[in-house]
Image (cartoon, rainbow, N blue to C red):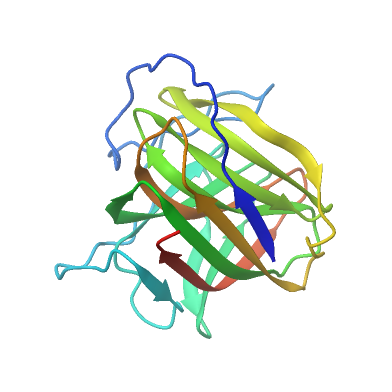
């Protein structure tokens, strides 16, 4: 069990950005690579009925309200629900996959998620809070090498983002290797970003494929 309390960060000036779910999805790219051309990404269509603000999603039914963004690569990820889990597979290196809950904006919030890294390659799994296209977002990532970081991400322009470390390459014995089921928790109470979307994230490094299954995600009051 990992508990991370966000601390105040100094943010750069706000450049112009696209709307939350644009037709051409913006994608940040890793350093020293060419900028990929934007291409439509698959999205999970929201439900016409009202969706809850606080919930536990065990991924055994509809994925209404969740929207997919991808960074760093134009390849299409494998995203599905199977056996009561949300399965995310990345087949391209240096790719960041975001699954955001679109219907609600949150200020103070707590996010818990249980997952299993099903591929024996280096990868990172994390949680996203206070996501905004215009203001940026915070993400907490736990890597299979036993380290974690907290990053502030922001779109600089279409297809390019900047990540500023809040906590970088910290180690924790609570982080388990691949094939172990573990739980992440992100508790957000104060930050320069006032509110935004929450979500889940999976990242690949140089080795692929990366395959992660989320057993459940819980969003509640801190």
Residue 72 left/right relative to 110: right
The reply, left or right, for residue 37 in relation to residue 144 is left
- Where residue 74 appears, as percent x and y from the top left, is 51, 41
**Residue found at x 71% / y 70%:** 118
The residue under the point 40% across, 41% down is: 131
Q: Quadrant of the N terminus?
A: bottom right
x then y, percent, for residue 22: 29, 38
Which residue is at 68% across, 58% downward?
210
Residue at 60%, 23% in the rendered image: 34
Comparing 3 with 146, the one in front is 3
168 over 103 or under it: above or below: above
Which of these two is toward me, 165 or 66? 165
Q: Residue 54: percent from the left, percent from the top?
A: 34, 67
Q: Which of these two is toward me, 44 or 216?
A: 216
Regarding residue 200, the answer to whether it shows in the image is yes
Residue 215, quarter of the rendered image: bottom right
Is residue 157 shown above or below 133?
above
Quarter of the image that includes the C terminus: bottom left
- Which of the 4 image quarters holds residue 16? top left
One can see residue 203 in this view: no
Count how many numbered circles sit on residues in the image.
Answer: 0
Residue 205 to residue 26: above or below = below
Query: Could you tell me residue 185's position as x and y percent?
Result: 59, 60
- Compare residues 5 and 81 and report the one nearer the observer: 5
User: With 217 as the anchor, is 5 left or right in this view?
Assistant: right
């Amino acid at each position: 069990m990992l508990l991370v309390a966000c601390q105040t960060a100094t943010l750069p000036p706000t450049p112009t950005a696209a709307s939350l779910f644009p037709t051409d999805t913006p994608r940040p790219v890793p350093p020293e690579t060419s900028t990929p051309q934007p291409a439509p990404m698959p999205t999970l269509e929201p439900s016409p009925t009202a969706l809850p603000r606080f919930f536990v999603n065990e991924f055994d039914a509809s994925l209404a309200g969740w929207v997919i963004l991808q960074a760093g690569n134009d390849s299409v990820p494998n995203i599905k629900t199977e056996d009561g889990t949300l399965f995310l597979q990345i087949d391209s290196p240096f790719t960041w996959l975001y699954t955001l809950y679109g219907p609600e904006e949150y200020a103070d919030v707590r996010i818990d998620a249980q997952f299993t890294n099903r591929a024996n390659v280096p990868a990172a799994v994390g949680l996203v809070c206070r996501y905004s296209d215009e203001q940026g977002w915070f993400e907490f990532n736990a890597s299979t090498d036993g380290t974690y970081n907290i990053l502030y991400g922001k779109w600089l322009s279409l297809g390019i983002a900047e990540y500023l470390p809040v906590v970088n390459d910290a180690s924790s014995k609570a982080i388990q290797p691949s094939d172990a089921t573990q739980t992440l928790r992100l508790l957000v109470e104060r930050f320069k970003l006032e509110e935004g979307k929450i979500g889940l994230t999976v990242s690949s490094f140089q080795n692929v494929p990366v395959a992660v299954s989320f057993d459940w995600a819980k969003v509640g009051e801190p």
